């Protein structure tokens, strides 16, 4: 998984990731009862829903943390079977977890490359396993600059950063290594207004680079600010598919809670 | 198309997307937005400052104390390394050595191991003492072979090394050994026990210390000689191991009394074991029927004799060991004369029921001269 | 407040300068780790104080002596530091090393086995015990404190069994080799010291210049994060404990070199001493933070303190007192600087 690889850019309008009829039961509880999803190239898709609507479970299926009982997941049109998160990662799907999964005492560059460290080329790297710290720092800095995300120094420890900056590091890590798409679980949940703005910026940068983003969020204003399409989940199924232009926030909330009916709009723009 | 949508959405004025600008500096909650190198420097500066402060304080104390300590640059330095600082035997030794050194105008540096058997602690202490430039080292070896290497280093540098209380193995690894003749002490104990028993047929119980211990073996054998029995004689009705501890002395005695209720004389390796044995004997109501003897001569031991719990004990003189050792070192420093061989610091029978043909001292004398 | 348009927070000139700045980093900068500065200052200050207090401190051979006295605990502390970095602790390191000395000594002294084989056997045994601890910690998820505590009891019993008796001298040339010294002017450097330094260099390299080392730090700092990014946590933990066991085996060889006497009573406090050295040197018991060189400095601080107190004739109780203060001070400093970063 070399950083030099650019993400593959499928033509506009093509479906990158698709889920059909996903069913997942936990004992008698049906977490997902035939859920669908399409992620189109170049978009930010927000998944919203009340607690228990199934959005977390659907995400876990997509990133490989959960294996569904029924249904299919297709990546670029071809069926895939993820048995663990590593499988999904190997196919180019990166996930930003709600608790970030960063090592606070270590610096930003180290965290970005954690688990996928770069070694010096040649025998020094393979025999002596010497890390190429300069290259990692350069790549990390370049990535941050490309994402237009600014940090005091690439060498500072993650724990010294604000919440938003830390989130940014986790997001950047996904951005560096994702080749197909990025999944984000509640990226602005613990952040203040200013920091949320920074993260939403990052999301847009990622999308603009050609990586579509799936986003779970409870925060309606953020969803409306950054999403291209919104998928509303209810009772383990997709209740509606809409965009920030077609519905207002309160209408979306109404669909979420079942107070209003959503019309299933399946075709992406 | 998409971009248009994005721009429309992002017109809320609250959003400011600069991270590195001045606005950031005002936001304390966001933490560090100054360049980290500066903050890092600040952090390490503070660390250094605190470290400096702490050690300056310590340094002042050290300097003050040591200028006093090193006032007389050419006084004779003597090293003492005892087994531990928890056994009163060794504490008294140290105190006696310190007092004698003061009297002689020398300086004693006393170190000790962390526990009985702490060889490395003693080795390191001897090494440091060599560096300190001592003229002589007095040592009670925790391990009779473990200190040989470092003792040789000391002697090679012309330092006099004297073993106190416990010999090294081999004994001539040191210049001289100052100790109790434990065999002789055992003999005294045995002689008294025989006399105290009188005409009765002996039924002897032996409460030994640690199997294989030099001191333990000597005392045991000495007792038998003084008592007039050979090893294996049927008059020896039983033996138990106590490791010189009170609780094991008690258990051992109980077991022996159960097996042989007619025991009438008991040998114990030291006074804690004897105290335990006494408890067992008293519990059986046999305190008048059993002659209980011991060795060591600590204050507690002499008090047992005084109270009638033990018929007699044989006193050692660790304070003499220590003081005599200091004297030898001072003598060596001044004249180059070395002591040699085994120097017996003596053993004295302590009892309140003496026999005319067996020299002994009473407990009054005992309490005045005991260690501890 | 500057309002800038979406996604354009960059001022164009900052980027190239920052990149240039970062490009100038090198080994030098990595070596001057900030956490080590504090302990180093303390060490230098102690040395200064003692050399002022008595001329014997800096005398020929004394400094070498201090380092020699640090060799065994210093080597054990390497393994301990690695384990502490993973948020674990090892209470059995002294016990494992002692068992190594007894086994090697017994094999050579009593049964006349070739020294090299005996030493290798002892090394394998120690590594095996390390691996046992590692398996229990990594596969069964048992707390390291308890695992190593229990292991210590078992090892102590085995040691007494194998030693059956007390200490015994071990006079083999190969086993005593680390005690041999090279004369350098007035002073001497033992092979044991060289081996210890070599091990410090090796493990420093592994911890700071390889991915394995970064994984070790990450596991100690946030184990869940390490798992989520794909670090093979179980495998790393096992390797840490196993390697530590190997280091303890080397420690047993160095112990025989320094004092050619196999003593079941030895190194009873080595576990706490190695933890003390690590903590004074800046390693955090919570894991994920610390520098190996700090541990070396911590070991030297304790040795210098003891040596200096003897040379100046000061009561040894000061040693425990000052060591205790240093430990608390080190932990407090660590917490304070961590807290400020929030």
Image (spheres, coloured by chain):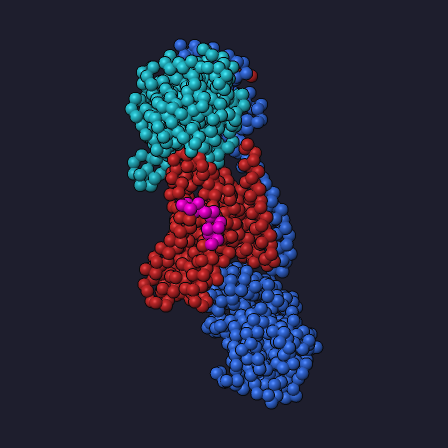
- Which residue is more in the foreground, C69 or B269? B269
Residue A235 horizontal/vertical position (percent): 45, 23
The answer to whether residue C73 shows anywhere in this view is: no
- Which residue is more in the foreground, B170 or B198? B198
User: Which chain is blue in the picture?
Assistant: B
Residue B94 horizontal/vertical position (percent): 61, 66
Left or right relative to B24: residue B102: right
**What's the residue at 53%, 42% (across, down)?**
C38
Q: What colour is chain A? A: cyan
| Viewport quadrant of the C terminus of chain C | top right
Residue C221 horizontal/vertical position (percent): 47, 38
Left or right relative to B309: residue C131: left
In reply to whether residue C147 is colored magenta, the answer given is yes
Left or right relative to B12: residue A90: left
Magenta segment main secondary structure: helix
**What's the residue at 47%, 60% (across, down)?**
C266
Residue at the far right: name it.
B364
- Which residue is more in the foreground, C293 or B176? C293
Q: What colour is chain C? A: red
**Above or below — where is A107 with respect to A214?**
below
Residue interval drawn in magenta: C137-150
The answer to whether residue A71 shows anywhere in this view is: yes
**Above or below — where is A268 with respect to B144?**
above
């Amino acid at each position: 998984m070399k950083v030099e690889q650019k993400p593959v850019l499928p033509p506009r309008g093509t479906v990158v990731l698709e889920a059909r009829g996903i069913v997942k039961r936990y004992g008698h509880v049906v977490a997902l009862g035939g859920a669908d999803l399409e992620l189109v190239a170049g978009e930010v898709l927000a998944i919203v829903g009340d607690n228990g609507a199934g959005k977390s479970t659907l995400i876990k299926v997509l990133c490989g943390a959960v294996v569904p009982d029924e249904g299919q997941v297709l990546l670029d049109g071809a069926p895939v079977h993820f048995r663990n998160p590593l499988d999904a990662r190997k196919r180019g799907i990166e996930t930003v977890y709600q608790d970030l999964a960063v090592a606070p005492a270590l610096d930003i560059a180290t965290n970005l490359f954690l688990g996928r460290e770069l070694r010096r080329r040649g025998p020094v790297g393979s025999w002596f396993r010497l890390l190429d710290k300069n290259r990692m720092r350069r790549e990390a800095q370049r990535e941050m600059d490309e994402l237009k995300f600014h940090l005091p120094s690439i060498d500072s420890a993650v724990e010294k950063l604000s919440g938003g900056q830390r989130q940014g590091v986790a997001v950047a890590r996904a951005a560096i290594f994702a080749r197909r798409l990025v999944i984000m679980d509640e990226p602005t949940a613990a952040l203040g207004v200013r920091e949320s703005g920074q993260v939403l910026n990052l999301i847009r940068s990622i999308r603009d680079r050609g990586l579509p983003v799936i986003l779970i969020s409870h925060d309606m204003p953020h969803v409306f600010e950054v999403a291209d399409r919104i998928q509303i989940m209810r009772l383990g199924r997709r209740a509606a598919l809409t965009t920030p232009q077609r519905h207002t926030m309160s209408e979306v909330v109404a669909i979420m809670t079942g107070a209003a009916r959503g019309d299933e709009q399946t075709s992406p723009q | 198309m998409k971009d248009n949508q994005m721009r429309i959405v992002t017109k809320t004025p609250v959003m400011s997307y600069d991270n590195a600008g001045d606005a950031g500096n005002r936001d304390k909650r966001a933490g560090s937005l100054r360049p980290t190198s500066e903050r890092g420097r600040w952090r390490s500066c503070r660390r250094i400052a605190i470290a400096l402060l702490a050690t300056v304080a310590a340094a002042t104390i050290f300097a003050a104390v040591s200028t006093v300590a090193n006032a007389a640059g050419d006084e004779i330095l003597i090293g003492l390394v005892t087994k531990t600082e928890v056994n009163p035997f060794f504490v008294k030794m140290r105190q006696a050595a310190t007092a004698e050194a003061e009297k002689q105008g020398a300086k004693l540096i006393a170190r000790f191991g962390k526990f009985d058997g702490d060889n490395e602690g003693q080795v390191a202490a001897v090494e440091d003492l060599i560096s300190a430039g001592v003229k002589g080292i007095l040592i009670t070896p925790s391990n009779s072979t473990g200190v040989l290497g470092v003792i040789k280093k000391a002697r090679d540098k012309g330092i006099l090394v004297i073993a106190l209380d416990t010999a090294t193995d081999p004994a001539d690894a040191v210049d001289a050994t100052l100790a109790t003749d434990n065999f002789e002490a055992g003999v005294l104990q045995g002689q008294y026990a025989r006399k105290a028993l009188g005409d009765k047929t002996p039924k002897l119980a032996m409460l030994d210390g640690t199997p294989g211990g030099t001191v333990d073996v000597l005392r045991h054998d000495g007792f038998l000689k003084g008592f007039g029995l050979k090893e294996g004689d049927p008059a020896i009705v039983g033996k138990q191991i106590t490791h010189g501890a009170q609780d094991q002395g008690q258990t051992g005695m109980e077991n022996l009394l159960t097996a042989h209720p007619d025991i009438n004389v008991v040998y114990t390796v030291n006074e804690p074991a004897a105290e335990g044995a006494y408890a067992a004997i008293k519990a059986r109501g046999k305190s008048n029927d059993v002659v209980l003897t011991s060795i060591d001569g600590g204050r507690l031991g002499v008090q047992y004799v005084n109270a009638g719990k033990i018929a007699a004990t044989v006193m050692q003189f660790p304070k003499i060991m220590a003081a005599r050792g200091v004297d030898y070192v001072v003598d060596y420093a001044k004249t180059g004369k070395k002591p040699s061989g085994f120097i017996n610091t003596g053993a004295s029978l302590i009892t309140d029921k003496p026999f005319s043909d067996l020299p002994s001292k009473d407990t009054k004398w005992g309490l005045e001269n005991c260690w501890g | 407040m500057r309002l800038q348009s979406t996604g354009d927070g960059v001022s164009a000139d900052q980027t190239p300068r920052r990149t240039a700045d970062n490009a100038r980093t090198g080994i030098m900068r990595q070596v001057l780790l900030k956490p080590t500065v504090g302990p180093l200052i303390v060490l230098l200050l102690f040395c200064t104080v003692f050399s002022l207090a008595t001329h014997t401190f800096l005398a020929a051979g004394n400094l070498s002596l201090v380092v020699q006295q640090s060799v065994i605990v210093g080597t054990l502390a390497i393994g301990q530091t690695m384990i502490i970095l993973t948020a674990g602790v090892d209470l059995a390191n002294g016990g494992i090393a002692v068992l190594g000395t007894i086994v090697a000594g017994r094999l050579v002294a009593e049964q006349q086995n070739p020294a090299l084989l005996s030493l290798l056997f002892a090394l394998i045994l120690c590594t095996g015990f390390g691996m046992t601890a590692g398996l229990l910690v990594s596969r069964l998820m048992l707390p390291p404190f308890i695992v190593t505590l229990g292991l210590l009891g078992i090892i102590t019993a085995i040691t007494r069994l194998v030693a059956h008796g007390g200490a015994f001298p071990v006079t083999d040339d190969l086993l005593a080799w680390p005690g041999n010294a090279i004369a350098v002017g007035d002073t001497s450097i033992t092979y044991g010291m060289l081996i210890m330094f070599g091990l410090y260099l090796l493990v420093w390299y592994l911890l700071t210049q390889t991915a394995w080392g970064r994984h070790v730090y990450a596991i100690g700092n946030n184990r869940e994060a390490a798992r989520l990014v794909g670090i093979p946590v179980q495998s790393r933990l096992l390797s840490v404990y196993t390697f530590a066991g190997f280091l303890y085996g080397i420690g047993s060889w160095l112990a025989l070199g320094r004092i050619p006497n196999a003593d079941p009573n030895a190194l009873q406090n080595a576990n706490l001493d190695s933890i003390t050295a690590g903590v004074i040197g800046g390693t955090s018991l919570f894991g994920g933070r610390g520098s190996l060189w700090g541990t070396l400095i911590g070991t030297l601080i304790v040795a210098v303190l003891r040596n200096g107190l003897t040379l100046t004739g000061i009561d040894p109780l000061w040693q425990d007192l000052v060591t205790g203060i240093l430990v608390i001070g080190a932990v407090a400093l660590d917490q304070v600087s961590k807290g400020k970063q929030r």
